[in-house]
Image (cartoon, coloured by chain):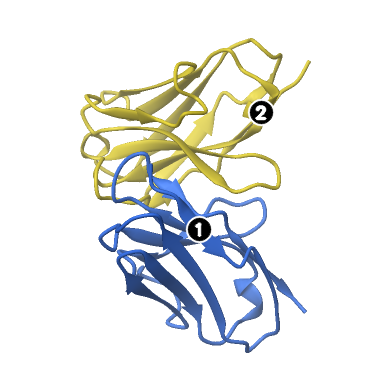
Chain colours: A blue, B yellow
C-alpha cells in the first residue's frame, strides 16, 4: 500500500498569511492526488483534484502543485473561513490513502 | 445535487455487529464507485473499504479485513457496510463517499457521517 506523509501536522497562522502544506507519497502516484478541507463536525470538501485542478466554486487563493511523489497545497492569502484541517488523498491504486492532516489555527 | 445520507450508527457493545446504510441521490449511482471512510475522535481519515460500480471489485484496509463487508444495491441507489466483531478501536464517524471510478479516481462527494460508538 502507498503511504502518504503530510506536513506540518499543525500551523498557527494569521489572516493574510501564505500557507504551504505538503504531501509526500511513498512511490510515484501519477498526479492522482486530491486536497480536501474539513471544518469541525463537517464532512471534507474537495478543493483540488488531479494534483493541480481547482474544483468548481473553490476560491482562486487555493492552488495545488507537484508531480510524482511530492505535492503542495498553497493558500495565497489566508482568510478566516479557511480555518480547519486539510488532508491529501492519493488514488493511484486501491486502497486509496489519506495524509495525516494539517490543522490550521489562528494566531 | 448529489446527496449521500448515512444511517445505522449508534452505540454497540464490543464483539457485536452493526450494519450501516448510505442512501444516495442526484447522480447516476450505477456508474460510480463507493467508499466508506472513517474518522476516529480527534484523528485523521481512514479509507476502510470501497466497491466498484457493478460490485465486482472491492478493497479493504488491513484494520477491517475479514470483519467488515461492503455491498451495494444498484436498484435502490444504496451502499451498505456490515461490521462484525466490533472493537473499541472501531469507534468513529463513518462517512460514505463517491468516486467516479474504482481505479484512478479520488473521492468527490461525501455524506455527513454517522457516529458508531463501541463501548460496553
Please say if the residues under marks 2 and 1 sit with CB atoms less than 8 Å apart.
no
Q: Position of residue A80 (x, y in %)?
A: 66, 78
Question: Could you say which is closer to the camera, residue A1 or residue B57?
Answer: A1
| Secondary structure under the numbered disc 1 in the rendered image | strand
- Mark 2 — residue? B89
Q: Chain of mark 2?
A: B
Chain ID at mark 1: A
Residue A54 image-quadrant placement: bottom left
Residue beneath the point at 29% across and 63% down: A31
Check chain identity for marks 2 and 1: say if they share one: no
Image-based side of B73 in relation to A11, left or right: left
Q: Give the x, y percent position of residue B37.
A: 49, 39
Point 67% across, 85% down: residue: A15
Q: Secondary structure at mark 2?
A: helix
Label 2 vs label 1: CA separation? Answer: 22 Å
Q: Position of residue A24 (x, y in %)?
A: 44, 63
Mark 1 nearby-residue class (10 Å; few <14, some 14–19, many ≥20) = some
Amino acid at each position: 500500500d502507498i503511504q502518504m506523509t503530510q506536513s506540518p501536522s499543525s500551523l498557527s497562522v494569521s489572516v493574510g498569511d501564505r500557507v504551504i502544506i505538503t504531501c509526500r507519497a511513498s512511490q510515484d502516484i501519477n498526479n492522482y492526488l486530491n486536497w480536501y478541507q474539513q471544518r469541525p463536525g463537517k464532512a471534507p470538501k474537495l478543493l483540488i483534484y488531479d494534483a493541480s485542478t481547482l474544483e468548481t466554486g473553490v476560491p482562486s487563493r487555493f492552488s495545488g502543485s507537484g508531480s510524482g511523489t511530492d505535492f503542495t497545497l498553497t493558500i495565497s492569502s489566508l482568510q478566516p473561513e479557511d480555518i480547519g484541517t486539510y488532508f491529501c488523498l492519493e488514488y493511484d491504486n486501491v486502497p486509496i490513502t489519506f495524509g495525516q492532516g494539517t490543522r490550521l489555527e489562528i494566531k | 445535487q448529489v446527496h449521500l445520507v448515512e444511517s445505522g450508527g449508534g452505540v454497540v457493545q464490543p464483539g457485536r455487529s452493526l450494519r450501516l446504510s448510505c442512501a444516495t441521490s442526484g447522480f447516476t449511482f450505477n456508474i460510480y464507485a463507493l467508499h466508506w471512510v472513517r474518522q476516529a475522535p480527534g484523528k485523521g481519515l481512514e479509507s476502510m473499504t470501497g466497491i466498484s460500480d457493478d460490485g465486482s471489485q472491492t478493497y479493504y484496509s488491513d484494520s477491517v479485513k475479514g470483519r467488515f463487508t461492503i455491498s451495494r444495491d444498484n436498484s435502490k441507489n444504496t451502499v451498505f457496510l456490515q461490521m462484525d466483531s466490533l472493537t473499541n478501536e472501531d469507534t468513529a464517524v463513518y462517512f460514505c463517499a463517491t468516486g467516479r471510478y474504482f481505479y484512478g479516481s479520488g473521492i468527490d462527494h461525501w455524506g455527513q457521517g454517522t457516529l458508531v460508538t463501541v463501548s460496553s
